[in-house]
Image (cartoon, helix red, strand yellow):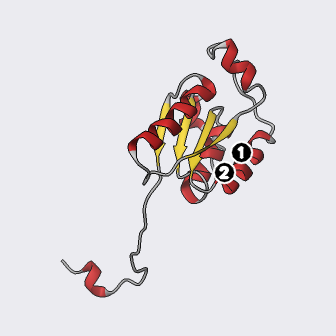
Amino acid sequence: MASSCDQFEAWRDLRGKVVMVTGASSGLGRDFSIDLAKAGCKIIAAARRTDLLKSLCDEINNMELNLISDDHIDDDVHEANQGQIAVAIELDICADGPTIEASVQKAWETFGRIDVLINNAGIRGNLSLVLSKMNFTM
């Protein structure tokens, strides 16, 4: 007999937290962002591809979610982002230090804090996608 366990039960302790997800424009980062929003988190979606980030944030912001009160978020910050559960921040992890710092500062100012970071962004580079038996030989 199948269990009717809530798939977000393990994430309930994160309810009301502000989560920054790097690499959020696709793949696991996108999935993390959607699932964490469903679990009651505010999302700062960060990546290079801002068109995909905007689409993700629109999708999240249009979901009917039951978030806890924003009493713990500064009033000025709350007014500036009222109604938003997810915001997009352009971030290239290959950029220079000051550029990354500026993106993180903008992310911080969005909700007045960052409680959790999911550092999911990666660099594939010019790696071949073809793997041979040699790749797995020890």
Where's residue 56, x and y in %?
70, 50
**Which amino acid type is marked by label 1?**
Cys
Residue 16 can be seen in this image: no
Q: Residue 82: x, y in percent?
A: 76, 25
Residue in front for this viewpoint, 68 or 29: 29
The residue nearer to you, when weighing 71 against 64, is 71
Q: Nearer the viewer, residue 100 or 12?
A: 100
Q: Position of residue 133 (x, y in %)?
A: 30, 86
The tag on residue 57 is 1
Q: Dot 1 lies on which element?
A: helix
**What is the spatial separation of the Cα atoms under label 1 and label 2, in whole angstroms?**
6 Å
User: Is disc 1 in contact with disc 2, using a CB cutoff of under 8 Å?
Assistant: yes
The residue located at (71%, 49%) in the rendering is 54
Q: Is residue 93 left or right of residue 68?
A: left
Of the 4 image quadrants, the one containing the C terminus is bottom left
Q: Is residue 130 above or below residue 62?
A: below
Q: Position of residue 59 (x, y in %)?
A: 76, 48
Numbered label attached to residue 53:
2
Using residue 102 as the reference point, say whether residue 136 is left or right of it.
left
